[in-house]
Image: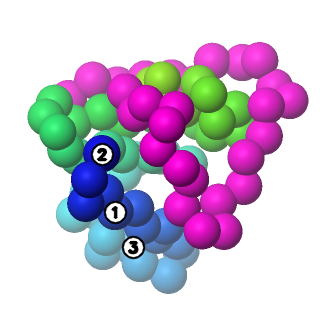
Amino acid sequence: MEGEQSRLIRIIKSRGMAHSNQVLATPTAIRRSPNPERRVIGDLSVTEQVLKGLDIPRSVKPAAGAVESTTRNEPPEVQRG
């Protein structure tokens, strides 16, 4: 996916960002485009499940500094926009 960007926002320091992005629980991962928006709320420790929940192909490399783990098998809660 060309032109992809990702941001990590620590809501303890940026409560306004949490409010404006309608983040009601943490942790939350949001994919805004392409539409429809997708959200994964809860356990983000299983990279494969998070990518699947956000409908991001595995061929997209994680952002610099991202931590990957595949040790847990609990599926995250997924909300479709």
Q: Work out whether mark 3 precedes mark 2 in sequence or the reverse, and give the earlier one.
A: 2
In three-dimensional space, the C-alpha distance between marks 3 and 2, rounded to whole angstroms, equals 29 Å
Q: Whole-percent x and y of residue 25?
A: 48, 45
Q: Which residues are magenta?
A: 54-81
Residues at discs 1 and 3 in contact (Cβ within 8 Å): no
The kind of residue tagged 3 is Arg
Whether residue 11 is visible here, answered yes or no, is no
Image position of 59 with respect to 23: above or below: above
Marks 3 & 2, CB-CB < 8 Å contact: no
What is the C-alpha distance between the residues marked 2 and 1? 10 Å
Residue receiving disc 3? 15
Mark 1 or 3, closer to the camera = 1
Where does label 1 land, which residue? 5
Secondary structure type for disc 2: loop
Query: Which quadrant holds the N terminus?
Result: top left
- Residue that mark 2 sits on: 1
Residues at marks 2 and 1 touching, judged by CB atoms closer than 8 Å: no
Please name the amino acid that badge 2 sits on.
Met
Residue, far bottom = 13
Q: Residues within 10 Å of mark 3 (few under 14, many from 20)?
A: few
List x then y, in percent, for residue 39.
Answer: 37, 36
Number of numbered labels in the structure image: 3
Specify which label sits upstream in the sequence, 1 or 3: 1
Which quadrant, please, contains the C terminus? top left
